[in-house]
Image (cartoon, helix red, strand yellow):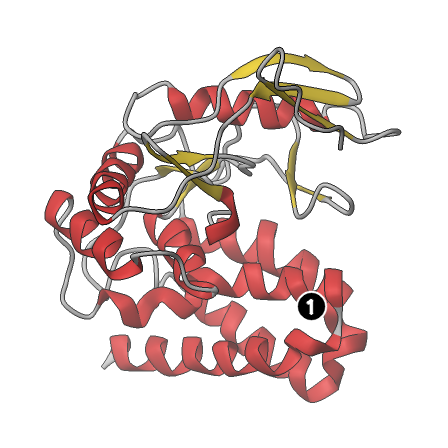
């Protein structure tokens, strides 16, 4: 990563030896998220095999009014839709930190449950198995089976969600607060379930989180118990942390997996 250049107001991300298409995928994701004009997105200035040049953003303190605008804008971004679950605006797709990203499939699916189970969770479950152990792996597979069954294809058991235009890695560090409001950076953009982004925002907390979520619901009303679905949509992010960072995330991941199974059972009653 090279320093920001105040003279030219650019920010250059670089990674020597980056996999082919890595920075092109991020650039395509940023442009796709910017298309609806729903949420501010960092502007792409140039892309090369080993670097990505972006406009330089000046951080500022998060403000409640900006959180309200961000929540409403995020709902409108999701409502802009995507061609399919798992569809990516680039030929390749990546997830994880700049220093150690891993590729994820960019295949299209009609059902959210199939996409999450087959292209997100099961590939990582195999990699995490040595860390999770036999009992943990079995608990994780129960959760994956519940997701694959379609229990979370809607929200709180109601309806079936259409593919949303999601950021895909929307933890709080990928929302940069400026004097003009919240700006999206570092996406793993794809067609997904709207609760993917909300679950990642809630995972580690975000400034004015309740304000963001309240504004989101004002723009896109949801069933009252929707938050009980969040474990199903944050499990991939947690499992990625097990793969990338090891055992310190195992307990949280397995607790979440059990909550997924319990929620699926409740929804079937």
Residue 114, position as x, y percentages in the image = 48, 52
Which residue carries the number 1 mark? Answer: 242
Quarter in which the C terminus is drawn:
bottom left
User: Image point 29% across, 39% down: which residue?
Assistant: 74
Q: Is residue 159 left or right of residue 176?
A: left
Identify which residue, 21 or 155, lies in the foreground: 21
Report the number of discs. 1
Secondary structure under the numbered disc 1 in the rendered image? helix
Identify which residue, 208 or 150, lies in the foreground: 208
Q: Is residue 229 above or below residue 26?
A: below
User: Image point 56% across, 36% down: which residue?
Assistant: 186
Residue 222, position as x, y percentages in the image = 16, 56
Residue farthest along the right direction in this orientation: 17
Q: Is residue 159 left or right of residue 258?
A: left
- The quadrant holding residue 223 is bottom left
User: Image point 50% across, 39% down: which residue?
Assistant: 86
Q: Mark yes or no: residue 101 visible.
A: yes
Residue 165, position as x, y percentages in the image = 37, 34
Residue 42, position as x, y percentages in the image = 48, 25
Quarter in which the N terminus is drawn:
top right
* Mark 1 neighbour class, 10 Å CA radius: few under 14, some 14 to 19, many 20 or more: many
């Amino acid at each position: 990563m090279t320093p920001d250049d105040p003279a030219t107001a650019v920010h250059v991300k670089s990674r020597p030896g980056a996999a082919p298409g890595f920075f092109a995928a991020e650039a395509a994701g940023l442009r796709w998220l910017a298309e609806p004009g729903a949420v501010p997105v960092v502007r792409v200035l140039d892309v090369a095999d080993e670097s990505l040049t972006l406009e330089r953003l000046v951080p500022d303190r998060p403000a409640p009014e900006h959180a309200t605008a961000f929540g409403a804008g995020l709902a409108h971004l999701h409502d802009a839709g995507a061609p399919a679950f798992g569809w990516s605006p680039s030929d390749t797709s990546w997830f994880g930190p700049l220093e150690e990203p891993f590729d994820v499939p960019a295949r299209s699916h009609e059902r959210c449950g199939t996409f999450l189970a087959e292209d997100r969770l099961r590939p990582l479950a195999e990699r995490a198995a040595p860390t999770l152990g036999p009992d943990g792996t079995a608990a994780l597979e129960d959760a994956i089976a519940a997701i694959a069954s379609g229990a979370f294809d809607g929200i709180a058991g109601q309806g079936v969600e259409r593919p949303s235009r999601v950021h895909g890695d929307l933890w709080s560090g990928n929302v940069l607060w400026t004097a003009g409001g919240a700006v999206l950076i570092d996406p793993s953009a794809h067609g997904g379930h709207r609760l993917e982004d909300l679950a990642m925002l809630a995972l580690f907390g975000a400034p004015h989180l309740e304000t963001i979520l309240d504004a989101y619901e004002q723009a896109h009303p949801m069933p009252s118990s929707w938050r009980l679905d969040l474990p199903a949509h944050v499990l991939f992010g947690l499992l990625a942390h097990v793969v990338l960072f090891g055992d310190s995330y195992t307990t949280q991941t397995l607790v979440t997996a059990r909550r997924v199974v319990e929620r699926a059972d409740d929804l079937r009653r």
